[in-house]
Image (tube, coloured by chain):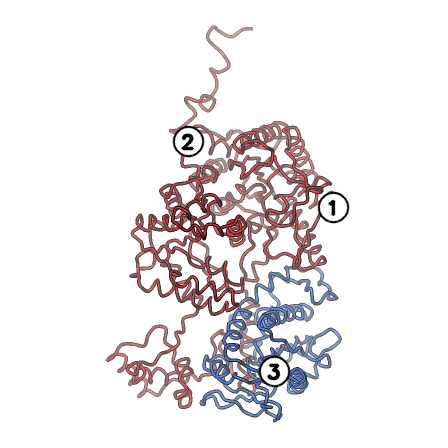
Amino acid sequence: MTSSPGAHPYGALSDRAFWSRAFDGRAPRDLVDPGHGPLIPEGAAVMSVGSCFAGNLVPFLERAGLHYLRTEPLADWLRIAPEAFGYSRYSAAYGHVYTARQLLQLLRRACGTFVPAEDRWHEPDRVIDPFRPGLRYAARTDTEFSALTAQHLRLTRDAFARAGVVIVTLGLNEAWSARDGAVFPACPGTVAGRFEPERHRFVDFTCAEVTADLAAFVTELRTLNPGVRVILTVSPVPLVATAGGRHVLEATTHAKAVLRVAAGEAARTFAGVIYFPAYEIVTGPQAPDGFFAPDRRSVSPEGVRAVMRVFLAACGRDLPEKAEAPPAAPMPDAARLSHAITQAECEEEMAGRPAVALPLPSHEADPMQHDAPDPETAARIAALAAAHGPLPADFDGATYIGLHPDLAALFTNAWQGDLHYLEHGQREGRIYPSNVTRAATKAAQARRIALVLDGLDGAGKSSIARRVAEAIGGRVLHPYDGNGPLLVWLARTGQHALADSIAHAAVAMAMDAVPHGVPIVFDRHWFTASQLLSSLYRPGWEPRPFTLLCWADRETTVARMIARGEDRDAQEMTQDRVETYRRLAAELDVPLLDTSRTTPEEATERVLALMTARGILPWRGAA
Amino acid sequence: MTPIVLAGHSHRKALGVARGDRSQAPDLLPLEPADQRFLGLSGGPKQAVYWDRLCALAPGRRIALAWEGNRYNDAFLLQGEPAFDLFVAELPHLPVLPDRVIVPERAVRERFAETATGLAAFLERLHVRGPADLVLVGAPPPKANTARLTALLGIGAYDAKLAAANGLDPDRLTLTPASVRLKLWQVEQTVLRTVAERFGSAMVTPPQACLDGSGCLHPDYWAEDATHANAAYGALMRDRIANHFT
């Protein structure tokens, strides 16, 4: 039987098969085959693993109401700074997994079927996990390392076993491995460890190898978790560097082609394995220019949102609006009562009397009595406040008394401090210690700060800060101008507490000159202090304002310094110094703004886009 | 030789530092009971004037400073969720309890960053004033006997009343096991000792005679509360402090 003249297989195809009909403007229509049904079945627990792009998906999944599985929450209850390098982003703390081989080995390590020979690196004060080299809270001893690693792998196995859907984002086909073939996420010596040519070798996985690794991964995963669905994606982010001898652009297209073909093969071979075209959405010819940041490597927030819009639509869900940051978790019950008991005991111990009264469960509990004044005195205080203005909002009668020995010798009640200040103290110009805590001050400051730019001299931050401030009607502040050398000298001579206090004071003093409501752009702020001073002082800068680290490669940095006539300083700008800033930014989770090959205008646009994506713009700062 | 000055936070009381008259400025007073080798700085350590006074007294004096040391109780006296344990490099013999989340020791250290920062800031101020010598007084280790400790909490009227004041069910709150508190104490002490050593000061640790077989505070040296030591402990500590300065 033959078909009628003019009939052919293309005639019955839907619009999605034809380039001319497959798009709404620049947005692909029906990109995901509707025959799959919802990509994430209702109620399925989702695990994601892969390159950094896999981490970008997680907040969208959670805000859309999907159940993102977390088996290893990384001691959040300790109320400490979170882990670096995104270890806390994923279902368990495996961090970024770039290659199919690393993915397969992660599953095998979790299941106990692969034990790498080179499983730890020793440094003077820590034991490094080669497969999680950037962990902030690294083990101190081998015993601790073994226990923490065993726990991590057990919880990773739990995640693989309990997930209804595993989303895998393939990032690279190049890697560095140990002698036994164990693949590291980063070349030894870059994030941690030491590169040893006789032990560490470069591998450039072929398409056949990646395909085989993916097939083995799916097969072994289903031995553990038979019903699991696997969604494969390819990261659109180009290689940061290649060690294979090719130009990085060529290496990137090769890598993405290898990964794309291997993912397609796996999806064709295994039922329940679906390829999701994130790579195509961002890099296809239809994609707007703005899907990449000006560095043409980072995917812009707009690009990520475009991917997630398609992904969530294929799950039957809408792209969620940007949510406000969740409020800080309340202190757990046990911690609240532990605190109350300890505070009470310390007060009683100092008071030297039996513990019968019920003390206030507060950090600020003090030995000063708080008996109310008699009605006549209360009326007097109210009258003084009405006549001369109320007590300052940050005034506390007890600490005011404590500061002045003559008053401390006379008064025992906080209200006596209130009365004295209104009657005499204000007129006498007596000072009082503000009862606003450092944390409260920092929180209030953060509400007024639109942006902090930090970085080495020559990184381009001043030009960008000026342009951003102009664009948003803000004011640029340079808090350390004039006292920078003093801070450096104090840091070098070990006077870190004093330097820390001066740094905070410099920020506060600079902000005092700006009317409330005007957005503030800082050219240097907490990051500068943090790279000078002991890490002990970092918590004092929380909550941090939105911060970007301007960074340029050494050649660019030096060229800019020479152009400014800073030849001598330029000579001291070593590669190490440039890299230290980059490493510290990663350690402190500060996004990097690479200005090496961009104009200030381009960089400014990028910054404004980031601020908009984060909800900082349009400006709604404290008025 | 002028007497050694004992000063600092609440653990100073076991050493014999008198509370003093809080209506007066902090001042040096004889210990209670008297010990000619020492004077204690009375006054409230929550007031800035207390620390200003210590700085003013510092030039040429020998100072023994009791700095906090109860942060581990403040955060972890009662067991929270999830129940956790840790390995501590200085206590390698202590095992980890079964079925507990293991947290990195380094993460727990981070939890004590605030007390370390406060100590560093104060030592820097103090050293500028030129004390003859300065030693950090280690805090007493935790108390192990759970039954007695629970009873003490009740005697002190803290447990049920404070729980009620905080809207909590006291029956659902249990003490953190002693072995875990011992490790947490050790981490806090290590952090404080490290800060002191950066300023060239040693830490005087609790005497072995005050410890039970597990390294916790022997019941003979308990004050009548959950976290402090008594005067007998203080007497032994004073000997160790005095020995340090000779």
- Callout 2–callout 3 Cβ contact below 8 Å: no
* Closer to us: B242 or A337: B242
- Callout 3–callout 1 Cβ contact below 8 Å: no
Tell me the CA gap for discs 2 and 1. Answer: 48 Å
Q: Is residue A214 above or below residue A64?
A: above
10 Å neighbourhood of mark 1: few (<14), some, or many (≥20)?
A: few
* Closer to us: A560 or A37: A560
Question: How far across and how far down the image is residue B215, in percent?
Answer: 72, 74
Question: How far across and how far down the image is residue B108, in percent?
Answer: 60, 63
Q: Residue B159: name its quadrant.
A: bottom right
* Closer to us: B110 or A316: B110
Which residue is found at the position 56% from the left and 58% from the top?
A76
Mark 2 and mark 3 on one chain: no
10 Å neighbourhood of mark 3: few (<14), some, or many (≥20)?
A: some
Q: Is residue A472 above or below residue B117?
A: above
The residue singled out by tag 2 in the image is A27
Q: Residue B240: name its quadrant.
A: bottom right
Frontmost of labels 2 and 1 is 1
Asked if residue B153 can be seen in this view, the reply is no
The residue singled out by tag 1 in the image is A117
Tell me the CA gap for discs 3 and 1. Answer: 56 Å
What is the secondary structure assignment of the residue under circle 3? helix
Amino acid on which the number 3 mark rests in the picture = Ile
Instruction: Look at the image and tell me in which quarter the C terminus of chain A lies.
Output: bottom left
Q: Which hue is chain A drawn in? A: red
What is the secondary structure assignment of the residue under circle 1? loop
The residue singled out by tag 3 in the image is B155
- Count of residue discs: 3
Q: Which hue is chain B drawn in? A: blue
